[in-house]
Image (cartoon, grey):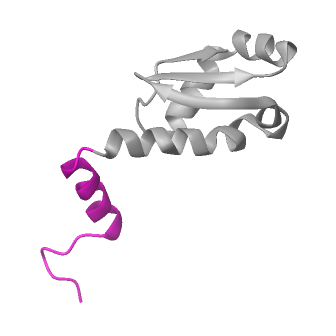
Amino acid sequence: MRKPNDITLKQAIDKLLNHYKLKGKFDETGILVMWPEIMGSAVANRTKQIYIHQKKLFVRIESSVVKNELLMVKSAIVDKLNEKAGSQVITDIVFL
């Protein structure tokens, strides 16, 4: 039987992350982990380096053809990544 002050595990983890100001870093890590899942194996296999700095996602792609294709759909990728994360984690993508 639940008591009136009981909270779910998800709520407790969210509270913990917010209290220690780790929510942003946690969301950024989630974006990095989701990159292969969202972009697919073809893009993930050609991705050499990926990191986030000041709400910008930096992605080093080894194929210039893939890089140009991704540049054309950059805003859609940003929207999809933020939607998966559940908050505004990144504002821009820079392809290196």
Relative depth, front residue between 63 and 30: 63
Q: Residue at x 30, y 70 (%)?
A: 8
Q: Residue at x 35, y 38 (%)?
A: 24
Q: Residue at x 75, y 30 (%)?
A: 47
Residue 59 lies, in percent from the top left, at 64, 24
Up the image or down, 19 lies above or below 90; here it is: below
Residue 86: in magenta span: no
Up the image or down, 9 lies above or below 30; here it is: below
In terms of image quadrants, where is residue 89? Answer: top left
Residue 94 lies, in percent from the top left, at 59, 14
Considering every residue shown, the one lying at the far left of the view is 4
Relative depth, front residue between 84 and 63: 63
Report the quarter where the N terminus lies.
bottom left
Name the side, left or right, on which 70 lies relative to 81.
Answer: right
Residue 7 lies, in percent from the top left, at 23, 70
Q: Residue at x 55, y 25 (%)?
A: 79
Residue 37 lies, in percent from the top left, at 70, 44
Magenta residue span: 1-21
Name the side, left or right, on which 84 lies relative to 71.
Answer: left
Report the quarter where the C terminus lies.
top right
Relative depth, front residue between 87 and 45: 45
Q: How many numbered discs, if any? A: 0
Residue 19: in magenta span: yes
Relative depth, front residue between 74 and 51: 51
